[in-house]
Image (cartoon, rainbow, N blue to C red):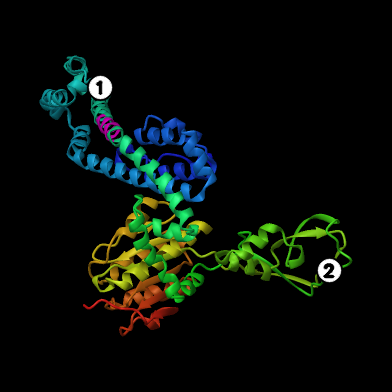
Amino acid sequence: MKLNDLTPNSSQAGGTLTSAFYLQLLQHFVDTGSYEAALPYLEDALTAYLIETMADPVITAQVLSDEVSARVFLDTHIQFVALCLKKAQYRLQRTTAERHQIKKAEQWSLSKREAGWRALLAQIDEEYGEDGFERAFFEQELNMEEGGVADDGKWTYFLNEWERLLRARMESEKHRFVNERKTMEQRLLQTNLRAVPSYIQNHQIGNEDFYQTWALMGGRWNSLEFERLQQVARLQRKYPLLMEVVKTMGRKADPLGNKHIGTTSGRSETMEHASRSDINGITMGRNLNALLPTEWAHYLDAELEDVFLQKYVTGQLQTFEYQSNQLHATRSLHQRRARPQGPMIVCVDRSGSMMGEPEKVALSLLMRLTEWCQKTRRDCYLIGLAVRTLPVDVMEDRAALLCFFQQRATGGTDARCMMDQTFELINSHPRYRGADVLWITDFRIPLPPASYFAEMERLQQADTRFYGLQLGVAENHWTKYFDRIFQLNDIRMAVV
């Protein structure tokens, strides 16, 4: 995140900063140790609390030196941010009638103003008199024979003052809530930062395994709960098919981000008595004997191996250039379209038939996919299939992601709402066009009207791919509409 990207969004809670703002602030801190970009927003109670925590040199040193501590710091605070924003949303809902009254007063006719301004003035004074509302001033201004309530400027100023007092009270309540919770949250953070890294080190748990299990814990550490939830993450080893699904999702782009890839034919390369002392610079190619160390790191990382192979095939690996390296002229040069780096839309069945092991398998795969998306910075959207779908943007709303993990399978199996949200996402957001869509379900789902399959086919022709992971052996009427369906047969299904 760039510093100038840290900007507020007033679309939530009457001007309150959004969860995306706080996530960017926290992510930037764990990446760089810097929080200066947020200093202009110190009047916001939650921002002030976060900066107070970030200013602690002991916490900063631990977060910057240990990836596990960084994740613990991020998720512990994200949960508190989510709680504060829910409270702010609740306060906003409580003021709906009052805000509506302000809007209606803006449209009052002159006769309505003359008949109702005194009662309105008394109402505001009763509510905000102790908050600094100047009743005497407005009574004098609005009661003047010339101008008074007939003066649109004075009337607007009066209503703006009312709205300002309303917002100030909401902000005051936010300050009070943060201050009341601050000590408890600081204690929770200290406990997590002390206990988690120690446990992980003593039990020799890999970072990736920790990240997946920790995501299910809601920002509160409990070693017994961690050991129980680890069994969910380990299902990826019990069912290797899950990793095959992960590798299928998210098609690769040209590593340089170009829309087209340059390819050649008739190219040859020879190395004459090359030594490691005649390095002339860095170039692009596929010479494995001259790879930069960073490329070897990509090759050794199982999750980035596909990126390495794509760069090798297209001759885009970064290699050392030697003076003794002789290149013959290319006989022909042409371009082909690069396949888009795949955004993902993952639709998870949260219906009652998924209870038990199917739900755990779905969670395990979901944990792996979301961690992979965050590691490779790939767009990913989660949509739940149940009575009420809960879409989550993995890269923008980590609090909602953690909440998604903690929900349990309940509800029905009507796929129309889930499909509607998928279609709307792809059609209205350019970054999701050509996405890989994955359904994780037992496919005990009634077929929707034919119009839904017509839209699926249209999207498939536009390079969207539909994949499925079927849990169990139920009869599947959806197979012909998908590009590929993986099937996990050896699994205990719920009795419905």
Could you tell me which residue is drawn at 83 percent across and 55 percent down?
A: 280
Left or right side of 296 for 123: left
* Label 2 sits on residue: 329
- First in sequence, mark 1 or 2: give its number: 1
| Residue 483 x, y percent position in the rendering | 45, 78
Residue situated in front as seen by the camera: 377 or 333: 377
Disc on res. 154: 1
Looking at the image, residue 98 lies above or below residue 213: above
Residue situated in front as seen by the camera: 23 or 260: 23
**Classed neighbour count for the residue bearing mark 2: other residues with Cα under 10 Å, few (<14), some (14–19), many (≥20):** few
Q: Quadrant of the C terminus?
A: bottom left
| Numbered disc in front, either 1 or 2 | 2
In the rendered structure, which amino acid carries the disc numbered 1? Lys
Looking at the image, residue 350 lies above or below residue 394: below
In the rendered structure, which amino acid carries the disc numbered 2? Ala
- Please tell me in which quadrant of the rendered image residue 300 appears: bottom right
Tell me if residue 173 is in the magenta stretch: yes
Distance CA(mark 1)–CA(mark 2): 79 Å
Residue situated in front as seen by the camera: 317 or 251: 317
Could you tell me which residue is drawn at 39 percent across and 56 percent down?
A: 215
| Residue 180 x, y percent position in the rendering | 27, 34
Q: Residues in magenta?
A: 169-177
Tell me if residue 445 is in the magenta stretch: no
Left or right side of 191 for 118: left
Q: Main secondary structure of the magenta part?
A: helix
- Kindly check if marks 1 and 2 are in contact, taking CB atoms under 8 A apart as contact: no
- Callout 1 secondary element: helix
| Residue 196 x, y percent position in the rendering | 42, 50
Could you tell me which residue is drawn at 64 percent across and 60 percent down?
A: 297
